Amino acid sequence: MKVVHSPLHARHDGGVELYRGQLVPLFEKPERAAMILAALEAAGHEVTPPRDFPESRLHRVHDAEFVAFLRGAYARWIAEDRQGHLLPSGFPARGMRRDHRPSGISGMLGYYAFDASTPIVAGTWDAALAAARAAMTAAALVVEGEAAAYALCRPPGHHAGRSTYGGYCYLNNAALAAQYLLDEGCRRVSVIDIDYHHGNGTQEIFWERDDVQFVSLHGTPDTEYPWFLGYADERGEGRGEGHTFNLPLPAGSGWDTYEGALGTALDAIRRYAPDALVVSLGVDTFAADPISAFRLDVPHYPLIGRLLAGLGLPTVLVQEGGYAVAEIGINVAGVIGAFATRAA
Ligand code: OKP
Ligand code: ZN
C-alpha cells in the first residue's frame, strides 16, 4: 500500500502536557512516526511525500480565522515576550462568554483550545500542515485509482473541530481526507474511527451532514478522554440525523467485546452504502498503551485490517493515536499489511 509521509512531523517536538496534575513530556512524540515508518518500509510498502494543496482545502473543514490563529500563534507568543510552549490555562466554561474572541494570546488560547494536553511549539504549524497534506494526498491517490492509501500523520487530527484544537490534534486530517473525496466526486463517505478515544472533532464537523457517516468505537467518555462527547445517544442532527453512530465500550474491554462492536460498526457502514471509506486508525487500543485501557494484542491488528478491507471500499487510512512506541510499528503494519493483502 502507498504510504504518504513527511519528515516535517519532527518539527513538532519538545512540548509538555498537563497529565494527572503534572507537566510531563508529550506522549505524542516524534519517535512514534519513526517507528511506524521503519515497520512499513521493512514490510515493503512504498513511501511517497505529501503534495501541496491550496489553503482553500483547509477552509472546507476549518474556520479560516482558526487556521490563521494556528499558523501565527507561536510568533505572537514570542512577540508578547513569553517563552517555550503555548498551553492554555483558562477556558470559557458555562456562564462565561464564548462569542467574544480575546485579542491577547492567553485568551485566544483558551478560546480555541479545549484541553491542556496540546502544546504549540515553534514547529507545530509546519508539522500539522504536513500531516493535513499527507491525508489529502492519500485521498488523492484513492481518487486516482489506488484501492487504498495510508497517511502517516503526526500530529493526529480526530479531536480537532471546525475551530477548536485539543487531544494532541490541530487540523483534522481524517475530515480533510473525507471532504477531499467528496469534493472530487464521491457522493457519500463513511468515516470509521477506531482510535481508543472518541473522535469528537470529526463528529462535530460532520454532525449535520448527510454526505458523511461518522462511526466510532472507543473507550466510554464517562471515564475516558475526551469526557464530554462520544456517548451512544449522540446520533447527528438535521440532515445528519442518524449518520453519527457511537459505540462506547467500557475501559478494560478485550478482543471479544471489541470484535462484536466492530462487526456492528461495519454493518452500519454497509447499510449507509458509501462510495469510499476513511479510517481514523489509532492503535492506542493496544493492551500496553500507557494512556488507554483496552486489551487488544499484536495478532488482533491484522484481523482488524482484514475486516476493514472486507467492506470492499476505496479506503484512505489516516494515522491517529498509539503511544506504546515499541509496538506501534508492528501494530500499524499489521493493519496495513492485512488490508493490502485482502484488498489486492
Ligand atoms: C489523542 B488520540 C488523560 C489525559 C488525556 C489527551 C489524550 C489525547 C489522545 N488523563 N490526554 O485520540 O490518541
Ligand atoms: Zn487516541
Image (cartoon, rainbow, N blue to C red):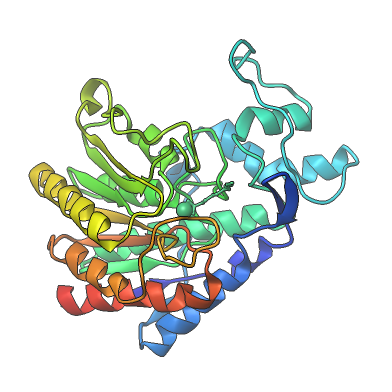
Give the image location of residue 92, x and y in percent: 64, 21
Nearest the eye: 81 or 50: 81
Q: Position of residue 288 (x, y in %)?
A: 48, 67
In the image, what residue occupies the spot 24% across and 65% down?
A: 144
The correct choice, above or below, for 222 with respect to 275 in the image is: above
| Image location of residue 141, percent across then percent down | 30, 66
- In the foreground, 154 or 143: 154
Image-based side of 63 in relation to 87, left or right = left
Image check: 278 left or right of 202? Answer: left
Q: Residue at x 63, y 13 (%)?
A: 97
Give the position of the C terminus as an image quadrant.
bottom left
Identify the residue at the far front of this view.
252
Is residue 248 at least partly visible in the picture?
A: yes
Q: Is residue 279 left or right of residue 319?
A: left
Q: Is residue 320 above or below residue 226?
A: below
What residue lies at 54% left-to-right and 56% top-to-bottom?
291
Question: What is the quadrant of residue 276 in the picture?
Answer: bottom left
Q: In the depicted view, which residue is nearer to us: 31 or 151?
A: 31
Q: Residue at x 77, y 31 (%)?
A: 106
Q: Is residue 66 above or below residue 158?
A: above
Front position in the image: 304 or 128: 304
The spot of residue 299 in percent (x, y) is: 30, 76
Q: Is residue 275 visible?
A: no
Please give left or right for residue 211 compared with residue 124 in the image: left
Outermost residue on the top side: it is 95
The N terminus appears in which quarter of the rendering? Answer: bottom left
The image quarter containing residue 40 is: bottom left
* Residue found at the far right of this picture: 81
- For the image shown, how many numbered marks are present on the structure? 0
Q: Is residue 341 depicted above or below 278 in this figure?
A: below
